[in-house]
Image: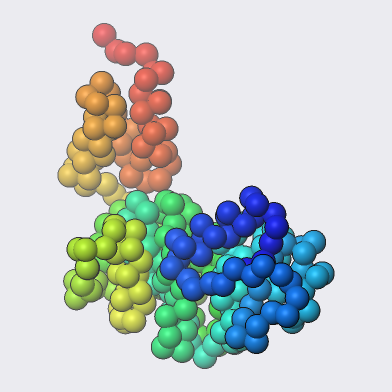
Amino acid sequence: MYTKDFSLYHDILKTLKKRKLAYVLLSSPKNIPKRISVVLTSKTESEEIKSQKIVSADTFDTVDHAVDMALKKLIGKKLYKQVFIGIDPGERPGIAVVGNDMLLQKTQAKSPEEVIQTIKRLLKLYPSEETCIRIGHGSILTRNRIINSLIPLNIPIEIVDETSTTHNQQTGRSERDQEAAAAIALLSGGRVQTTLPLEPTRGAIKNVQRHSRQITEGRYTISEKTAIQVLKGELSLLEAIEKEKTEPKRL
C-alpha cells in the first residue's frame, strides 16, 4: 500500500486489518520490491507507480470493493470453472465464495436485504462457467427473504443442511458466521424451484417483540402486526420501534 492521503490510508489499513490480510506499507512509489504483486493507492498517486497491478482505492464506491479487486489481481484468475457462494442466514448474514475448490473471500452483509447487492458484486468479481448459491436451512423466514431476493438473478440456489457445520466458539460472532458460510458453500443441497412463503411463526413474532423491549429497556413493545413487518423485511426493528412511538395509543 502506498498513499500520502491520510484519510484513504486509514480506511485501507482498517479494511486490511479487519479482513486479516497481509500487507506492506511502502514509503516511496519508486523501486517497489518484486515480491509486491499489487499496490493499493489513490488515483492521483497511481501515476507515480510503475506497475501493471495497481488498484486506485478512491475510484471504488467502498474501500472493501477496492480490496476485492486487489485480491482478484493478486490471484490473477479471469474465469473460474466453478464458483459456489455460501450464505449463513441471519440478521447479519455471513457470505463466502469458493472458486475451483479454493476459498476466495469471506464477508458479512449488514442485513438480509443487503445480501443481493453483495452477491451481485461477487458475481462480477468472480466470473465462472458454473455458479451456484448455497444457503443454510436455518433462520427460515430470514432465509426465505434472502432466497426470494436472489431468484431474479437466475442462478441455481440450493438449501443446505448446515447441521454438520461446526462453529469455533472462541472466535467472534461475525467470524463464526463467515466460517459457517464457507462450510455451506462446500455442501450440496436441495434446489429451490420457486419463491418461498414468508409466514412468521408465533415464536418468531414473540422473539421480535422481546427484542423491541430489550432495545427500549422495557419502554416499548411493538405490536404483532409491526413485528410481522419486521420479520418480512418491510421494516427494520429500529424503524418499527419509532413507528410504535409515534402511533397514537388506543384507549
Query: Which is nearer the eye, 104 or 192?
Result: 104
In the image, 49 versus 247, the foreground residue is: 49
Residue 145 seen in render: no
| Quarter where residue 245 is shown | top left
Q: Is residue 159 above or below residue 188?
A: above
Determine if residue 141 is in view: yes
Residue 43 screen position, x and y as percent:
76, 63
Residue sitting at x 52%, y 90%: 81
Name the residue rendered at 22%, 24% in the picture: 218
What residue is at 74 percent from the left and 72 percent from the top? 29
Q: Quadrant of the N terminus?
A: bottom right
Q: Residue at x 26, y 9 (%)?
A: 251
Image coordinates for residue 112, horizontal then vertical, percent: 41, 54
What x and y, as percent, mark residue 101? 41, 88
Query: Where is residue 165 shown, x and y percent of the image?
Result: 23, 74
**Where, by quadrant of the figure, is residue 241 drawn?**
top left
- Which is more toward the observer, 190 or 94? 94
